[in-house]
Image: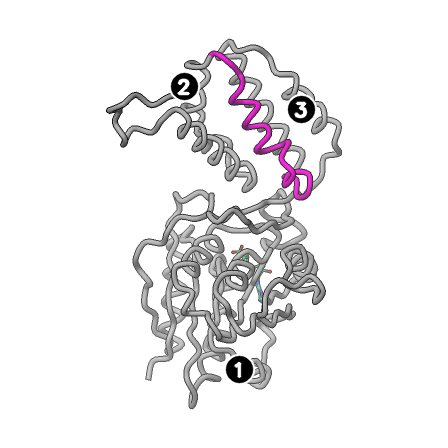
Amino acid sequence: MMECAGSNKNVPSRKQNRVDILKQFQSRFFATSRLVSFPWTVLENDLELSKSSDVILEILKQTCLHALCRKFPPSPRYRKCFISELIRRVESAGCEPLDELYDALAEVVAAQDVTEGYRTYLLPRGDGVSLLENVALISEGTTGLVTWEAALYLAEWALDHPQTFAGRKVLELGSGAGLTGVVVCHSCGPSSYIFSDCHQSVLQRLRDNLSINGLLNNKTKTTRTEVSVQELDWTDMTEERLKEFSVEVVIAADVVYDPDVVVVLVQFLSKILKCSRGRVPAEVLICSTVRNPHTYAGFKHSLSDAGIGHRVMSGAVNHVFEYNRESEIELVQLYACQ
Ligand SMILES: C[S@@+](CC[C@H](N)C(=O)[O-])C[C@H]1O[C@@H](n2cnc3c(N)ncnc32)[C@H](O)[C@@H]1O
């Protein structure tokens, strides 16, 4: 569509609107965001104006029919809900039915229902982090087979503060599916990065996800960072082993979620800070979703009882990833009190 001379440059053109809709649908689809978070009203307006289902076909090409979806497909159940919603929108706008939608639906209906699927977290520069994750938030007795909001927040913070990691040795606690570490390794240039967790299924998934993202297999490795995956249980870690790591930065996302876990975590953090004494102290950053204020306040009390101080890293982060930002997320830096 031609822009009229003298048209308001601040009002997005219809073409720009279309590009924005497609981008938003694509990034939310690949991150398997909740369907309510998609810009349905903007889509309805577009359908209303154009009276054609062209935009739906374009959305389908950027999502279910995209090459990324062939390589790293979200779970069949998610794709089925997504396509069904598109069909509903086309029908209610009175646009002509689209064969491609029904073909895509038939394909996912025929697919076996599985407990896992890929999530791809797209970066503004166009690439992304694809991770195999379980559909259920808790499965196989662990919370570590999905990516939690605090991991995405911490990754965004890292993208804004690459100097915290550049050229340094980093240890991540409770890495889960691996999102934060993959982003840090690809974008912040640490000299080494230890992913760690205590759960066997999580450790195996972590290795698989790191390979997918070019971080483990030497032949396909895409970064100079020395990457390893270590079994590390906070209940069972000696100061000697910690000293061997000689890390300079320690990070963790969403590890403060249960009062029992908090107790062992704080004991472990205390050991980390003790090991740093006599040399440059490790920078310790813990990022938490404050689901239960009582549990989180308990964490802070335990820190203080253990002689650990904390400062809240306030300040907004640039929004990069698609996730639910309704919950409060707090990032704290820990230090040993004298
Ligand atoms: C809520 S998940 C967070 C995973 C990931 N950091 C994220 O935010 O997406 C908590 C993680 O902490 C790990 N974890 C829990 N207790 C642990 C312990 N005692 N030692 C090591 N890891 C532990 C779990 O296995 C799980 O992967």
Comes first in the chain, label 1 or label 2: 2
Quadrant of the frame with the N terminus: top left
Image marks 1 and 3: residues in contact by CB distance under 8 Å:
no
72 horizontally vs 246: left or right: right
Residue located 60% across and 72% down the image: 226
Residue range in magenta is 51-74
Q: Amino acid at mark 1?
A: Ser
Residue 300's disc is: none
Quadrant of the frame with the C terminus: bottom left
Q: Is mark 1 within 8 Å of ligand 1?
A: no
Q: Was residue 65 drawn as part of the magenta stretch in this picture?
A: yes
Rendered-image quarter of ligand 1: bottom right
Comes first in the chain, label 3 or label 2: 2
Q: Amino acid at mark 3?
A: Leu
Residue 105's disc is: 3
Residue located 40% across and 76% down the image: 306
Foreground of the two, 256 or 157: 157
Q: Amino acid at mark 2?
A: Asn
Mark 3 vs mark 2, foreground winner is 2
69 horizontally vs 85: left or right: right
User: x%, y% of residue 2?
Assistant: 37, 21
Q: Residue furthest bottom?
A: 278
Q: CA distance from mark 3 to mark 2?
A: 24 Å
SS at badge 2? helix
Query: Quick check: 14 above or below 260?
Result: above
User: x%, y% of residue 86?
Assistant: 55, 22
Residue bearing mark 2: 45
Residue bearing mark 1: 246
Q: CA distance from mark 1 to mark 2?
A: 57 Å
Residue located 59% across and 77% down the image: 237
Local packing at callout 3 (Cα closer than 10 Å; few below 14, some 14-19, many 20+) is many
